Amino acid sequence: MALTPEDVVNKRFQQTKFREGYDQDEVDDFLDEIVVELRRLSTENAELREKLAEAGSGVPVAAAEPVAAAPAAVAPAATKADDADAASSANDLLTLARRLHEEHVQEGATKRDALIAEGHETATRLVAEAEATATIAQIKSGEPFGKVAKQKSIDPSKEQNGQAGWVLPNQINPSIALVMTNLPKGGMSSTPIQTPNGWYIIKLEEKRPFKVPSFDETKNQVRANLVAQKQAEFINALREKAKITQ
């Protein structure tokens, strides 16, 4: 069966099981089919040109019968039209083949870059987790928590030997809060805790009940906050009303 442009447009390739993209052998075979078809069309074009030349140089046998000679005048025009259509079809097939090849190459490159980026991200995460696990083992072997935190932590609290101060569970990352609330006094997380900011190792130094401060204990702070708020509002109002001239 002759290959048509519709065959090229509707061609579907099977996906491979071991890598992203299409089966390269199948794509190559399909392009080989296109090459064979293009060669066939080129051969037909050459034969049509030869026939056209012969028809143009021949002498009509029945010159006295104009009606019988009429088809001979129409035949060359039809041959030229077929020749042009065949050449156009060959060019269309070649254009489609090139476009399909470029699309497959681009799709493969995009998926390749995505896989490489994902691989780098996974490798970075695994390395960081392994380092955090080794740090836990170092602390369990007898190294002071504060000393190790000062050496290896990337959190600002490293300057205070890892001391984060008093915190409420709702003030910290939920993953850390879940581990913290279940630790006994002096306990340390047995495995690294993953957060968007990296891996954490926590040690619970102390627990105490949360007490809502009385008004007398907080009135000075409340007054200072209100004064600062009013000052900011007053300054913003002056800026909005001010007219600057140059």
Image (spheres, rainbow, N blue to C red):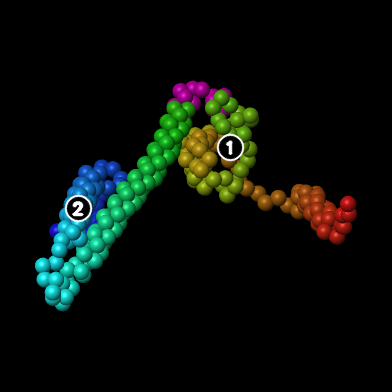
Task: Measuring from the top left, give residue 234's x and y in whole percent.
Answer: 84, 56
Q: Residues within 10 Å of mark 2 (few under 14, many from 20)?
A: few
**Quarter residue 79 falls in:** bottom left
Q: Of callouts 1 and 2, which one flags the residue occurring earlier in the amino acid sequence?
A: 2
Q: Viewer-nearest of labels 1 and 2?
A: 2
Query: x and y percent of residue 226 in the render?
Result: 80, 54
The residues colored magenta run 136-149
Query: Image quarter for residue 84?
Result: bottom left
- Main SS of the magenta part reads helix
On screen, residue 226 versus residue 65, left or right, reads: right
Name which residue lies at 76% across and 53% down: 215
Would you say residue 126 is visible in this rendering?
no
- Name the residue at 76% across, 50% down: 218
- On residue 206, which mark appears? 1
192 or 16: which is nearer to us?
A: 16
- Helix, strand or loop for disc 1: loop
Q: Is residue 164 left or right of residue 65?
A: right
**Contact between labelled residues 2 and 1, with CB atoms less than 8 Å apart:** no
Estimate the x, y position of residue 123 in percent, counting from the top left: 41, 34
Residue type at tag 1:
Glu
Give the vertical position of 99 relative to 146 (above or below). Answer: below
Distance Cα–Cα, label 1 vs label 2: 94 Å
- Residue at the extreme front: 64
Please state the total of marks drawn on the protein image: 2
Quarter of the image that includes the N terminus: bottom left
- Residue 49 shown in magenta: no
Q: Which residue is mark 2?
A: 46
